[in-house]
C-alpha cells in the first residue's frame, strides 16, 4: 500500500511554478489544484499520518473489501484519541475553536433561555481562533451579538450599552463592517418623532445590509409616513441586495413579505397575495420571520373575510408552527386568539369572551425593559383609530363628533395611501351626510370608489358600504327639492328597486362574515322595501284605472295591469320570505350568542399550549 500511494502521488506536482500557477498536464497527469488532485493529496497525507496500528487496520479493511465481506469503519471513540490510529502532529496538539458553543447559544435563544445563551456566547468567543495570538480578536462580534439578543428581548438599555461598547472596539480594530452594524442598531434605539415625515432616514452607504434599509419601512409606517416613502426604501433595499455579492435568501424573501404588507395597506390584495405565495412557495418551515409573517397575514385576511376555520387551519398547520422560536410563538399564539376573539365579537358571544377567551389571552411579545422613557416608535395609524372611534360614535347617534374623526381618517389615509381605510371612512362620511339630509351627496361620494369596494377585498366593508349606499338611494328620493314633499309612487318604486341589488349584496356579505345584528337590519330593510314596492305598484294600478283606462288604450292597460299585479304578488312573496328569514336568523343569533366553549375550541386552545410547552423545553 505504501508503494501504491507513492506511485499515485507522482501524478500530482509537488509545488506550483514561480508565478504561483499550477503546473499543467504536460509533465503531470493531474493538476495540483483540481478536485481530483486535491483528493489525491489528501489521501496521501492521511495515509502517511497513520500509525502502525492504523496501517494494519487499513490493510485489514482493504482485504475485507476485496473479498466482498464487510469492510471495517467500525471505529470506536477511544480509537480517535491518544494517537492509536493517527500520529499526532503539532496542529493536533493545539486547541481548535469549536462551533458547539454557538449552536447551543442559538438553541438557547430560540427557547428564551437568556442566561444559557449569554454563557454559551461568551464561551464561543473566548476560544482561540488564530495561532498568532492567544486572544480571539473578535470581542466586538461578541458584544454585537449580545446587543442583538437584548434588543430582541426588549431590553433596550442593555442593548444600547453593548452596541456602544462593540462600536468602540470595532473602530479600534478597524472593523468597518461591524461598526456599520453597530451604528444601524443604535439608530433603531433612538426615539423617533411622532410627526410624519420629520424623521431623518438612513443614508445608504457601500456594504449597507439590505435588511437594515428594509427596517426603515417599518419605522416609516410606525411613525406615520406615507406609503411612497415606504416603497422608496423598499427599492433602496432591493438595490443594496443587487449590489451585494452576499445578498442572502433571508433578505430576498423579507423584501417580498414587506411588499405584500405594503400592497395590503394600499388596498391591492391581489398583488399582496402574489408576494405572499412567492414566500410560502420558496421557503420552508422554520427558515426565518418572513414565512411566518406572510402566513399570519394570510390567516388574518381569512378571518377578516369570515373564514375563521380556514384561518385556524393555516395557523395550526405543522408547517407553520414547526421551528418557531419563543418570540415567534408569542405572535403566532396571539393571532390564533385574535381570530377566535374577532369571530366571537362579531357573533356577540359575550359569555365566551369574558369566561374563556379573555382569561386565556396570550402575550404577543416581551415587554420593553428600558428604564425611564420607553425607547420605541409611536404608532400613528390614525386612520384605523379614527374609523373605530367614528363607528362607536355613529352607533351612539353622535354624528357631529363622529365627523371630526372621519375627516381626520380621510386626510391621513389619503396622505399615506392606505386606501382600505379611506374607503371605510368614505362610507362613514356618506352615512353622516345622509343623517344630515344630504343623501345625494353621500351617494355620489360612495359611487366615486364603488368599483374598488365591489372588488371584494374586504367583504365586511363592502357589505357596510352597499347597505349605506342603498339607504342613501332611498333617502335621496325624499330629499330632491323639498324634504316635506312626498315623491310620486313611480319615483318611490324606482328608488326602492334600485336599492334592492345593494341590499342583497350586503345581506350576502354579512352572512358570510357572520355578523348577525347587521344582517338582521339588512333583512328587515329588504322586507320593508318589498312591502313598499308592492304598495307603490298598487297605487300605480289605482291611479291607472282612472287616468289611463281610456277607450283607445283599454286593451294595453289590461295587459300592463296584469303584469303589475304579478309584480305585486312577487313582492309580497319576497316580503314574506324576508320575514321568515328574519325569524330564523334572529333565532340563530340568540342560540349562537348564548353558546360557550365547545370541545373544538378547547382543543384549539390546548394545542396552542402544547406547542408553547414544546418550544419552551430547554435543550440539554
Image (cartoon, helix red, strand yellow):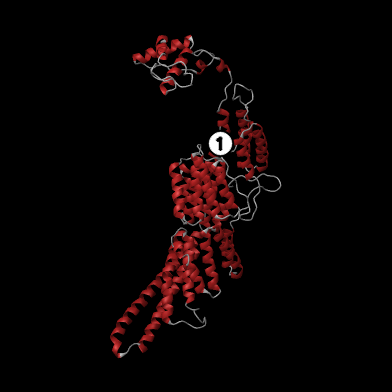
Q: Quadrant of residue 546?
A: bottom left
Q: In the orientation shown, which residue stands out farthest toward the right?
A: 372
Q: Is residue 295 above or below residue 19?
A: below
Query: Residue 239 location, x and y as percent?
Result: 51, 44
Residue 27 or residue 147, whichever sits in front: 27
Residue 287 lies, in percent from the top left, at 49, 39
Q: Can you identify the residue that label 1 sits on?
A: 617
The secondary structure type at the circle numbered 1 is: loop
Please provide percent x and percent y for residue 387.
Answer: 56, 62
Above or below: residue 17 compared with residue 525: above
Say if residue 309 shows up in the picture: no
Outermost residue, bottom side:
551
Residue 540 image-quadrant placement: bottom left
173 to 497, vertically: above or below: above
Neighbor class of circle 1 (other Cα within 10 Å; few <14, some 14-19, many 20+) is: few
- Please tell me whether residue 478 is drawn above or below residue 34 in the rendered image: below
Is the C terminus in the top left, top right, bottom left or bottom right quadrant? top right
Residue 219 visible in the picture: yes
Image location (x, y in percent) of residue 151 = 62, 41
Amino acid at each position: 500500500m505504501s508503494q501504491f500511494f507513492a506511485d499515485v502521488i507522482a501524478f500530482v506536482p509537488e509545488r506550483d511554478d514561480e508565478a504561483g500557477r499550477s503546473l499543467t498536464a504536460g509533465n503531470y497527469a493531474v493538476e495540483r489544484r483540481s478536485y481530483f488532485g486535491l483528493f489525491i493529496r489528501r489521501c496521501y497525507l492521511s495515509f502517511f499520518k497513520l500509525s502502525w496500528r492504523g496501517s494494519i487496520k487499513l490493510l485489514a479493511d482493504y482485504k475485507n473489501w476485496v473479498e466482498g465481506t464487510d469492510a471495517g469503519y467500525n471505529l470506536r471513540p477511544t480509537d480517535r484519541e491518544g494517537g492509536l490510529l493517527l500520529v499526532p502532529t503539532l496542529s493536533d496538539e493545539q486547541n481548535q475553536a469549536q462551533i458547539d458553543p454557538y449552536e447551543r447559544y442559538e438553541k438557547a435563544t430560540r427557547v428564551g433561555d437568556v442566561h444559557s445563551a449569554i454563557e454559551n456566547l461568551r464561551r464561543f468567543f473566548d476560544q482561540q481562533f488564530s495561532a498568532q495570538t492567544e486572544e480571539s480578536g473578535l470581542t466586538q462580534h461578541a458584544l454585537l451579538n449580545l446587543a442583538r439578543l437584548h434588543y430582541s428581548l426588549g431590553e433596550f438599555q442593555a442593548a444600547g450599552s453593548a452596541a456602544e461598547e462593540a462600536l468602540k472596539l470595532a473602530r479600534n480594530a478597524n472593523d468597518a463592517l461591524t461598526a456599520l452594524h453597530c451604528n444601524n442598531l443604535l439608530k433603531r434605539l433612538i426615539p423617533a418623532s411622532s410627526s410624519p415625515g420629520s424623521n431623518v432616514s438612513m443614508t445608504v452607504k457601500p456594504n449597507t445590509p439590505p435588511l437594515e434599509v428594509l427596517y426603515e419601512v417599518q419605522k416609516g409606517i410606525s411613525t406615520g409616513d406615507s406609503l411612497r416613502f415606504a416603497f422608496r426604501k423598499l427599492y433602496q433595499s432591493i438595490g443594496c441586495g443587487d449590489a451585494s455579492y452576499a445578498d442572502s435568501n433571508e433578505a430576498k424573501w423579507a423584501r417580498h413579505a414587506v411588499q405584500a404588507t405594503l400592497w395590503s395597506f394600499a388596498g391591492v390584495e391581489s398583488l399582496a397575495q402574489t408576494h405572499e405565495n412567492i414566500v410560502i412557495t420558496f421557503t420552508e418551515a422554520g427558515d426565518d420571520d418572513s414565512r411566518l409573517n406572510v402566513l399570519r397575514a394570510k390567516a388574518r385576511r381569512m378571518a377578516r373575510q369570515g373564514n375563521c376555520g380556514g384561518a385556524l387551519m393555516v395557523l395550526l398547520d405543522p408547517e407553520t408552527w414547526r421551528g418557531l422560536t419563543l418570540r415567534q410563538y408569542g405572535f403566532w399564539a396571539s393571532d390564533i386568539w385574535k381570530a377566535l376573539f374577532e369571530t366571537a365579537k362579531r357573533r356577540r358571544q359575550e359569555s365566551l369572551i369574558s369566561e374563556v377567551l379573555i382569561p386565556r389571552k396570550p402575550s404577543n411579545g416581551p415587554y420593553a425593559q428600558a428604564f425611564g422613557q420607553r425607547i420605541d416608535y409611536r404608532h400613528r395609524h390614525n386612520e384605523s383609530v379614527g374609523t373605530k372611534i367614528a363607528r362607536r360614535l355613529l352607533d351612539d347617534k353622535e354624528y357631529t363628533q363622529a365627523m371630526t374623526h372621519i375627516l381626520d381618517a380621510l386626510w391621513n389615509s389619503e396622505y399615506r395611501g392606505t386606501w382600505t381605510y379611506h374607503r371605510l371612512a368614505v362610507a362613514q362620511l356618506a352615512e353622516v351626510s345622509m343623517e344630515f339630509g344630504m343623501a345625494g351627496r353621500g351617494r355620489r361620494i360612495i359611487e366615486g370608489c364603488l368599483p374598488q369596494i365591489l372588488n371584494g377585498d374586504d367583504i365586511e366593508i363592502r357589505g357596510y358600504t352597499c347597505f349605506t349606499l342603498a339607504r342613501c338611494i332611498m333617502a335621496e328620493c325624499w330629499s330632491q327639492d323639498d324634504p316635506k314633499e312626498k315623491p310620486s309612487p313611480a319615483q318611490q318604486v324606482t328608488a326602492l328597486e334600485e336599492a334592492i341589488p345593494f341590499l342583497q349584496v350586503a345581506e350576502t356579505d354579512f352572512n358570510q362574515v357572520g355578523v348577525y345584528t347587521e344582517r338582521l337590519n339588512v333583512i328587515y330593510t329588504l322586507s320593508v322595501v318589498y312591502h313598499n314596492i308592492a304598495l307603490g305598484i298598487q297605487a300605480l294600478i289605482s291611479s291607472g284605472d282612472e287616468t289611463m283606462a281610456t277607450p283607445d288604450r283599454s286593451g294595453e292597460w289590461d295587459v300592463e295591469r296584469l303584469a303589475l299585479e304579478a309584480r305585486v304578488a312577487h313582492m309580497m312573496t319576497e316580503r314574506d320570505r324576508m320575514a321568515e328569514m328574519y325569524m330564523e336568523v334572529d333565532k340563530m343569533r340568540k342560540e349562537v350568542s348564548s353558546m360557550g366553549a365547545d370541545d373544538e375550541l378547547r382543543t384549539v386552545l390546548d394545542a396552542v399550549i402544547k406547542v408553547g410547552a414544546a418550544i419552551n423545553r430547554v435543550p440539554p
